[in-house]
Amino acid sequence: MEIILQQGSVINLSKDFPNLKKIGIGLGWDLRHYKGQFDLDASAFMLNGKGKIPADEFFIFYNNLLSPDGSVEHLGDHRTGLKEGDDEVITVSFNRARNDIFEILFVVTIHDAAERNQSFVQVKNAYIRLFDYEKQESIAKYNLTEDHANETGIEFGRLSLKNGEWIFSAVGKGYRNGLQDFVDQYV
């Protein structure tokens, strides 16, 4: 049964889904009446105990698809939102994560939003969902457009390792700046 997430929701994946080994984070969207290219991008920042990425390779996005330890993988950039289901997917293999990675931050940004004068107001049916990658079973879903119409980036959630357990927290914090601002914050 899929959980509908709200801002601030927390799921203890280790307790609630004890056999979960690999999780998928799927991003999907459709366009309102917009002509031209509109590209949402899912990205992940693998953070150490200081809240920073240990090296550039731990920023996973459309130009760096796989973390050095193989635990986080972006399955490819989709630039239109025209296909059914998830347009982009990032996977996390819990057993491959380095022991100095304590948090994985997931963000969604609009590529070249400032140059194209775009925001989430031009998007409909945008969501991110968590799913058991091996079984292809949905765990939770979060609607991204509900509260973030004027933003161009959203910190969707955080996957944290606390006391040996993987906890997912729905953050839902919107930003009006691009992906580079997230990079500057976590490098």
Image (cartoon, helix red, strand yellow):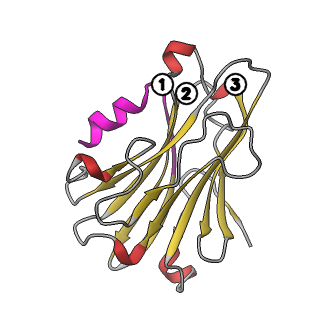
Pointers 3 and 2 in contact (C-beta within 8 Å) = no
The span picked out in magenta is: 171-187
Q: State the residue lying farthest toward the right.
A: 33
Tell us which disc is closer to us: 3 or 2: 3
Dot placed on the residue nearer the N-terminal end, 3 or 2: 3
Residue drawn at (59%, 31%) of the image:
39
Q: Which residue is mark 3?
A: 122
Q: Left or right? Give the position of 177 relative to 76.
A: left
Q: Amino acid at mark 2?
A: Glu
* Residue 78 in the image, given as x and y percentages of width and height: 60, 41
- Work out which quarter of the rendered image holds the N terminus and state it: bottom right
> Looking at the image, which is closer to me, 19 or 96?
96
* Residue 98 in the image, given as x and y percentages of width and height: 27, 70
Pointers 2 and 1 in contact (C-beta within 8 Å) = yes
Q: Which residue is mark 2?
A: 151
Dot placed on the residue nearer the N-terminal end, 3 or 1: 3
Q: Left or right? Give the position of 68 relative to 126.
A: left
Q: Vertically, is 37 above or below 129?
A: above
What's the distance in space between the residues labelled 3 and 2, CA to CA? 11 Å
> Looking at the image, which is closer to me, 181 or 37?
37
Q: Which residue is mark 1?
A: 176
The answer to which quarter of the image holds residue 95 is bottom left
